[in-house]
């Protein structure tokens, strides 16, 4: 995107031109403009934005010397100079796994040679790959993830001036039927809650919080005592705990504005939270020789200022399921899905559910929980038909 800099009575418009085929940054294009004197400040701002758009379009249509740049070479550049400034470390690590599949099949192609059929054929070949650990084909979810990574990389290539369009767009179609999310029905949810009451108060509080609020496991690990408003019975979800392999756990802000949100809890949950806080205060005083503070994480490593790792709770939840004869296909994220389904079954509208879950768009919620909303529609239709029969 063009930038505008004031220079006395004139303005300088600067357009970044990306990189050349050797991976070196191309000198930006510049243009000095003078707004008409009779314009008001607001009109000047509008005029400058129009001039910036026009100049950027002019620059983008100038051919760039990138015809020899291969996808493999661009990905090297992307991993070194572009991705670290845009993506979380955990996302880059996951993208690297996809890149290991992309490079052998597509890395040798020049960026300007890539066509939709290359991607369609690539996805078809991926569906034939057998995983050595499970002896089963790659899941469609994995292939969809590879496509998303490709689209992300090539979108940045367009933004950097290497390509005029993204050749991977709309080249992927989900094969087969999408699996429904792993969700505990109301009866199973009640059994899970009963089982949690036999666990330590730390694990009981953690898992019940997710069932009660639908927050993600990393969001729950990232909670601090200052995030709780006892008067309003609300929790401010404003950070996420992330653990990357071979690195120390860290916390970061939510990915989207919608992820920064408030959720509410019941009187019963308040009672459990207060009891758990007393336990945390005792442990902190006994083992850390200090008082519990508002800046402490709810689920903190003993003797440390860092939060517990989300995978610790993943492992513990599997043990709880096994010990109590509960469905082994469930996981911690299933509790989030269960919370959403129970809200929907209770008649909560889609916009409210989306807000509680931290989805940017209600359409995301509809897409994920279509089956749950469909059940509500059937129940509503049956109710209407019953009224007509009366």
Image (cartoon, rainbow, N blue to C red):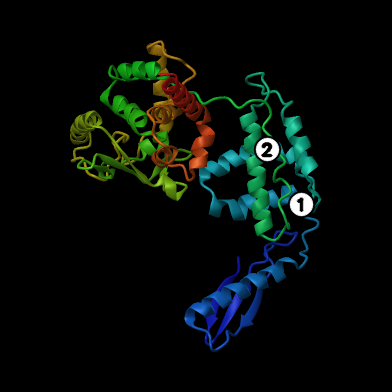
- For the N terminus, give its image quadrant: bottom right
- Residue 278 lies in what quarter of the image? top left
Give the x, y percent position of residue 366: 51, 36
Q: Is residue 379 above or below residue 153?
A: above
On screen, 274 above or below 30?
Answer: above
Image point (18%, 41%), residue name = 291
Q: Quadrant of residue 356?
A: top left
Q: From the viewer's perspective, is 123 left or right of 232? A: right
Residue nearest the observer in this picture, 174 or 90 = 174
Mark 1 residue crowding within 10 angstroms, few (<14) / some (14–19) / many (20+) = many
Q: Position of residue 81 (x, y in %)?
A: 61, 55
Between 208 and 301, the one nearer to me in the picture:
208
Residue 178, x across and y down, in percent: 60, 27
Q: Which residue appears at 38% of the width and 45% of the height?
A: 239
Disc tally is 2
Of callouts 2 and 1, the N-terminal one: 2
User: Callout 2: 10 Å neighbours few (<14), some, many (20+)?
Assistant: few
Residue tagged 1: 111
Name the foreground residue: 273 vs 130.
273
Against 142, residue 330 (above or below) is above
SS for callout 1: helix
Provide the secondary structure element on which disc 2 rests: helix
**Circle 2 residue:** 100
Residue 248 occupies quadrant: top left
Residue 268 appears in the figure: yes
User: Residue 314 location, x and y as percent?
Assistant: 43, 26
Task: Quarter of the image for the C terminus: give it.
Answer: top left
- In space, the residues marked 2 and 1 are separated at their CA atoms by 18 Å
Q: Residue at x 29, y 33 (%)?
A: 302
In the image shown, does 327 or 187 lie closer to the viewer?
Answer: 187
Residue farthest toward the top in the current orientation of the protein = 325
């Amino acid at each position: 995107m063009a930038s505008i800099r004031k220079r006395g009575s004139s303005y300088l418009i600067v357009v970044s031109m990306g990189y050349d085929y050797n991976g070196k940054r191309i000198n930006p294009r510049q243009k000095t403009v003078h707004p008409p004197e009779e314009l008001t400040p607001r009109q000047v701002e509008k005029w400058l934005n129009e001039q910036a758009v026009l100049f950027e379009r002019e620059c983008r249509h100038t051919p760039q010397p990138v015809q020899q740049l291969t996808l493999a070479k661009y990905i090297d550049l992307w991993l070194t100079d572009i991705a670290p400034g845009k993506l979380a470390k955990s996302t880059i690590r996951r993208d690297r796994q996809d890149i290991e599949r992309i490079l052998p099949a597509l890395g040798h192609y020049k960026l300007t040679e890539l066509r939709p059929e290359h991607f369609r054929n690539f996805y078809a070949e991926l569906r034939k790959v057998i995983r050595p650990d499970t002896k089963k084909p790659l899941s469609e979810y994995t292939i969809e993830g590879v496509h998303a990574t490709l689209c992300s990389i090539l979108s940045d290539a367009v933004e950097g001036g290497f390509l005029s369009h993204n050749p991977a767009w709309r080249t992927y179609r989900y094969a087969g039927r999408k699996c429904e999310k792993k969700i505990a029905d109301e009866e199973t949810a009640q059994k899970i809650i009963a089982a949690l009451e036999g666990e330590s108060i730390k694990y009981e509080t953690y898992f019940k919080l997710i069932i009660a609020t639908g927050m993600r496991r990393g969001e729950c690990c990232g909670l601090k005592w200052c995030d709780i408003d006892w008067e309003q019975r609300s929790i401010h979800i404003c950070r996420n705990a992330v653990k990357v392999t071979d690195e120390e756990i860290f916390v970061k802000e939510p990915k989207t504005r919608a992820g920064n949100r408030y959720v509410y809890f019941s009187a019963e949950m308040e009672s459990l939270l207060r009891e758990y806080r007393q336990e945390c205060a005792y442990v902190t005083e006994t083992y850390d020789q200090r008082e519990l503070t508002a800046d402490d994480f709810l689920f903190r490593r003993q003797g440390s200022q860092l939060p517990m790792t989300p995978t610790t709770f993943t492992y513990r939840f599997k043990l709880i399921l096994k010990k109590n004869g509960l469905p082994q296909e469930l996981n911690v994220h299933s509790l989030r899905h269960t919370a959403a389904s129970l809200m929907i079954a209770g008649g909560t509208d889609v916009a409210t559910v989306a807000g509680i879950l931290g989805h940017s768009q209600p359409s995301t919620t509809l897409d994920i929980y279509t089956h749950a909303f469909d059940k509500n529609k059937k129940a509503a239709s049956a109710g209407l038909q019953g009224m007509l029969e009366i």
